[in-house]
Amino acid sequence: ANPRDALSLAGRGEVLRILGRPEAAIKDLDSALELDPWDVSALANRGAAKLALGFAADALRDLDGAVEMEPKNAFARATRGACRSAQGAHDAAMADLDQALQGSPEDVYALFCRGTVRRKAGDYAGARADLDLALE
């Protein structure tokens, strides 16, 4: 990636995150955000990478920022829901996931996250329904 191109750095960071390389992703996403601090996608992806490393409090700061900048961003909302669930805030997690799915009712990631939260809460029928929808 071009070290002076925020979009290129953010794109590579997202790919690294998806490939399971969150440390490397964070380096590129940090660089992208230094060049363009308003890049919602880079901020949400950095939050997701931090969450993958178990840094939920740091992840939540990034995800709060992304949702504040773009409230209807389904990935940012769903990832914040997953982060809140990891912190034990299941009601707040469900609120984020429900909002993510209002704007994108077939979003597989949001359905997976909500199904996971429902399972943790003991709502096995709801979890199954969300996961079945994700597989359609």
Image (cartoon, rainbow, N blue to C red):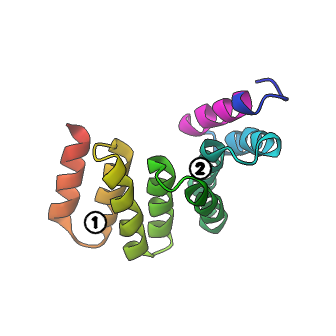
The quadrant in which residue 96 appears is bottom left
Asked if residue 17 lies in the magenta stretch, the reply is yes
Q: Nearer the viewer, residue 7 or 29?
A: 7
Q: Is residue 36 left or right of residue 20?
A: right
Q: Amino acid at mark 2?
A: Ala
- 2 vs 1, front mark: 2
Mark 1: secondary structure = helix
- Tell me the element at label 2: helix
Which numbered marker is on residue 46?
none
- The answer to whether 97 appears left or right of 5 in the picture is left
Quadrant of the frame with the C terminus: top left
CA gap, disc 2 to disc 1?
23 Å
Q: Residue at position x 45%, y 75% from top?
A: 88
Where residue 85 appears, x then y in whole percent?
Answer: 44, 68
The residue at which mark 2 appears reads as 44
- Is residue 98 within the magenta segment? no
> In the image, what residue occupies the spot 71% across and 45% down?
26
Which label was assigned to residue 118?
1
Span highlighted in magenta in the image: 8-19
Residue at coordinates 80% horizontally, 23% vertically from top-left?
A: 2
Label 2 crowd (10 A; few <14 / some 14-19 / many >=20): many
What secondary structure characterizes most of the magenta part?
helix
